[in-house]
Image (cartoon, rainbow, N blue to C red):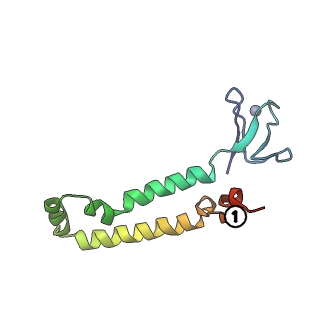
Amino acid sequence: SYFVCDDVTCAHRSRRLTFKPINDGTVCSVCHQGTMKREYSAKMLYDQQCFFKSVFDLRTAVEKTKHEEKRKLQTYPNYASLNQMYERLLEVCDQFLAENAYNEINLSHIFAPMKIF
Ligand SMILES: [Zn+2]
């Protein structure tokens, strides 16, 4: 993945970080003003994966249609095979979502403010 300088006037792009990391990036080696940040963050990837999951969720889409439309869709000649294909695509989305670090909930972080002293 690429790193890009967050200073838009510089916008230096590199695969390597040449300086020591600080917080969520490093100081840009070109302009020395901006911070090199991941071009594509785990959150951005997570959002895209959620989008694909919503696109491939045929079952939910059919459930949201009106009774007459639902009946028409479900009696469509290729509905069973289409449904099977969309179920498989949904499984692939779920596999990648499960592997995304952004999907993990750190309970100790969430409940930290509730810590009893
Ligand atoms: Zn820069």
Q: Position of residue 87 (x, y in %)?
A: 37, 70
Residue at image coords 74%, 47%: 24
Q: Mark 1 belongs to which amino acid?
A: Ser
Residue 110's place in the image compared with 92, above or below, is above
Graded by Cα atoms within 10 Å as few (under 14), some (14 to 19) or many (20 or more), the crowding at tag 1 reads: few
Left or right placement of residue 4 versus residue 92 in this view: right
**SS at mark 1 in the image:** helix
State ligand 1's quadrant. Answer: top right
The quadrant in which residue 9 appears is top right
- The residue furthest top is 9
Residue 19's place in the image compared with 32, above or below, is below
Residue at image coords 67%, 61%: 111
Q: Tell me the residue that label 1 is attached to.
A: 108
Q: Where is residue 4 in the image (x, y as percent from the top left)?
A: 70, 40
Left or right placement of residue 61 versus residue 19 in this view: left
Left or right placement of residue 26 versus residue 2 in this view: right
Left or right placement of residue 75 versus residue 88 in this view: left
The quadrant in which residue 54 appears is bottom left
Q: Position of residue 114 (x, y in %)?
A: 68, 59
Q: Which of 102 and 93 is in front in this view?
A: 102
- The residue furthest right is 20
The total number of labels drawn is 1
Q: Position of residue 91 (x, y in %)?
A: 45, 70
Quarter of the image for the C terminus: give it: bottom right
The quadrant in which residue 89 appears is bottom left
Residue at image coords 71%, 43%: 37
Decide if ligand 1 comes within 8 Å of the CB at mark 1: no
Residue at image coords 62%, 48%: 40
Q: Which of 71 and 109 is in front in this view?
A: 109
